[in-house]
Image: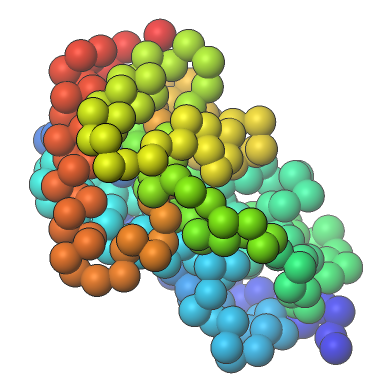
Amino acid sequence: MLSVVEHISSSEIPAPTLERAVGTGPVVLICDHATRFIPASLDTLGLSADLHDSHIVWDPGALDLAQRLSVRLDAPLIYPGVSRLVIDCNRVVDAADSIVPVSENISVPGNLDLPPDERARRKQAVYDPFHHTIDDLLETRREHGMTTALVAVHSFTPVFHGKPRPWQVGVIFEAGNRFGAAVCEELAKDRDLCVGVNKPYSPGDGVYHTVSRHKDKYGLAGVMLEIRNDLLRNAGDLDWWADRLEHVLRNSLESVGSDPA
């Protein structure tokens, strides 16, 4: 198997997408793992075709859900143009899992023994434009005095390393985050939901990078949402979650405002 595939070609990298840029709602949505796209220059990163739709490549259902929320909340939505396996925009760039050589025991040949110059090219082509797009939007909203809470939308697999995950939805936030606590309280009002508080991940796992980086810089409320991906497989499920989360986010913001403390 190949240990290193061809260098990434910047000309193949789609620019980050900003939908509903002039949305006036109080939320800005992020979808870090929106797409399966891997540039042809990377030769599928050496992955077999049967893996291209799997959760190691993207977050199934997350973009569809985020787009529905964008409509309901009149919220701008930002997402990168390539798979997280090329580079994970939701990780610190020098972290070991920024560009993973192995994901859930599956080898990613095109990421093995990656030289520093290729890592730098991926950062410059994918990570930097994505985060600059977020900064530019948040700066514009601040200049216009707009209330803003940053909400990242992700999905997670129902079984990980052979262990079932009981939660339908997880809320990831750091200690002292009143908005995150309010979101948990609102979700818990539905007794049919098993809500994971900092489950299946927590900020300590390094998965909270995008929210933390931008909400702290601009002094915003922020939270990361994780929906189990087997609950996002059809339009009816997606609409149900979008309706529920719209209600949850609006009520949570009403209770705490945009104050992150």
The answer to whether one can see residue 208 in this image is no
115 sits left or right of 224 in the view = right
Q: Residue at x 24, y 71 (%)?
A: 234
Q: Quadrant of the C terminus?
A: top left
Seen at 46% across and 36% down, the residue is 196
* Closer to the camera in the image, 243 or 42: 243
Seen in the image, is 32 located left or right of residue 260? right
Residue 252 horizontal/vertical position (percent):
23, 23
Which residue is depicted at the point 44% across and 45% down?
Answer: 167
Closer to us: 190 or 6: 190
Relative image position of residue 46 (x, y in whole percent): 72, 85
Query: Is 78 left or right of 19, judged from the image as shown?
Result: right
**Above/below status of 115 relative to 124:** below
The answer to which of 248 and 206 lies nearer the viewer is 248
Colour scheme employed for the rendering of this structure: rainbow
Q: Quadrant of the N terminus?
A: bottom right
Residue 257 at least partly seen: yes
Dividing the picture into quarters, in which one does residue 209 lie? top right
Counting the numbered discs, the total is: 0
Residue at 18%, 43% (x, y): give it. Answer: 244
- Please, is residue 17 above or below residue 234 in the view? above
In the displayed image of the protein, which residue is found farthest to the front? 191
Q: Which percent across, then down, holds residue 205?
A: 66, 38
